[in-house]
Amino acid sequence: MKGSAKPRARRRAAERRRIAGRATLLQAAWNYETLQAIGFAWALLPGLERLYPDPRERARRVLDRLEVFNSNPYLATIGLGVALRLEEEVARGAAGAERRQARLLKALCGSLGALGDRLFWAGWRPALGLAAAVLALATSSPWPAVAFVIAYNVLAQGVRWRGVRAGFAGGAGVARVLQDPFWARASAAAGTAGAVGAGAALGAGAVWAYGFGGGEVRAGIFLLLVALLWLAGLRIGSGDRRLSPVLAFWTVLILLSALFRLIPVLP
C-alpha cells in the first residue's frame, strides 16, 4: 500500500498541474451566455477523465459544468481545485454532492473575482508594466518589455498552480483557504508595488518631458494632465460613471501633443 501511495500522489500532482496549465486558456471560449464556463470545464477535464472512465458519464458531467461561471482568470483555479475535490464526492455517490458543488462554485465567483482583481489588475500588472515602461525610457531597449512578459506570466502561472492545489486541499472548507494570510500579504505587496511603480513612472515621465526639449513648460503640462486624469479617474470611479470616448480621445491627443509636439500647444 505504501509503495503505491507515492506514485498515486505524483499522478494526482501531475493532474493538478495539467489543470493549472489548461486554466491559461480559461477565457479562450468566453461568451455572453456562460462566460468562462466552457474554459472551466475544459480545464477540469483531466480530473474528469480519471473519475469517469465511461465517456458518456464523463460527457454528462462536462455538460453539468457548463453553467455560468465568471471570476478573475487567475484565481479561478481555486474554484477548479474545489470543483475537482467535490467531483470526487460526486463520483463516489455522496448524497447532495452535486448541489453542494454548484452552490459553492456560484458563491466563489464574487470572492475570487474581488481578490484576484485587487491582486492582479490593481497591483502586479500596473506595477510591473510601469516598471518596464520606466526602464524602457531609461535604456531605449526592448528588453524591459520582454522581462515584463516573462515576469508577469511566471507570477500568474505560479498563482494558478497554487490555486488549484489550495482549492483541492480546502474542498468544501475553501473559506479557510481564502483566509490564508498569504493572499492578504500578496495583495498588500501588490498594492505597495503598484503605488511605487506609479510614483516612479510619474517622476520618469516628468523628467522625460523636461529633457525632450520642452523644458519646464512641457514638464508642467505633463504633470497637470496627469493630475487631471487622476482626478477624473477618482470622480468616475466614485460615481460608477464611464469616461466619454470623445473626452478620452482629446485628453490623450493633448497629452501626446505636449510630449511630442504634434501640435503647438503653447507658443
Image (cartoon, rainbow, N blue to C red):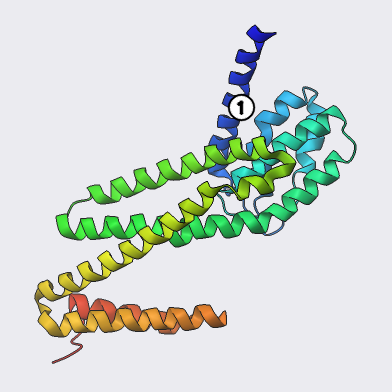
- Kindly identify the residue that appears in the image at 59 percent across and 45 percent down: 26
Q: What amino acid is found at the position of numbered circle 1 in the picture?
A: Glu
Q: Secondary structure at mark 1?
A: helix
Instruction: Find residue 148 and report its horizontal and vertical position in percent.
Output: 33, 49
Q: Is residue 130 left or right of residue 244?
A: left
Question: What residue is pinned by disc 1?
Answer: 15
Tell me: residue 53, above or below residue 30.
above
- Kindly identify the residue that appears in the image at 54 percent across and 55 percent down: 116
Within the image, what quadrant is residue 31 found in? bottom right
Q: Quarter holding the C terminus?
A: bottom left
Instruction: Find residue 155 and report its horizontal and vertical position in percent.
Output: 43, 44
Please state which of residues 249 and 108 is positioned toward the viewer in this rendering: 108
Instruction: Find residue 122 and report its horizontal and vertical position in percent.
Output: 46, 62
Tell me: residue 109, above or below residue 58.
below
Please state which of residues 209 and 259 is positioned toward the viewer in this rendering: 209
Q: Is residue 19 left or right of residue 172?
A: left
Please state which of residues 75 and 32 is positioned toward the viewer in this rendering: 75
Within the image, what quadrant is residue 47 found in? top right
Q: Is residue 256 left or right of residue 62?
A: left
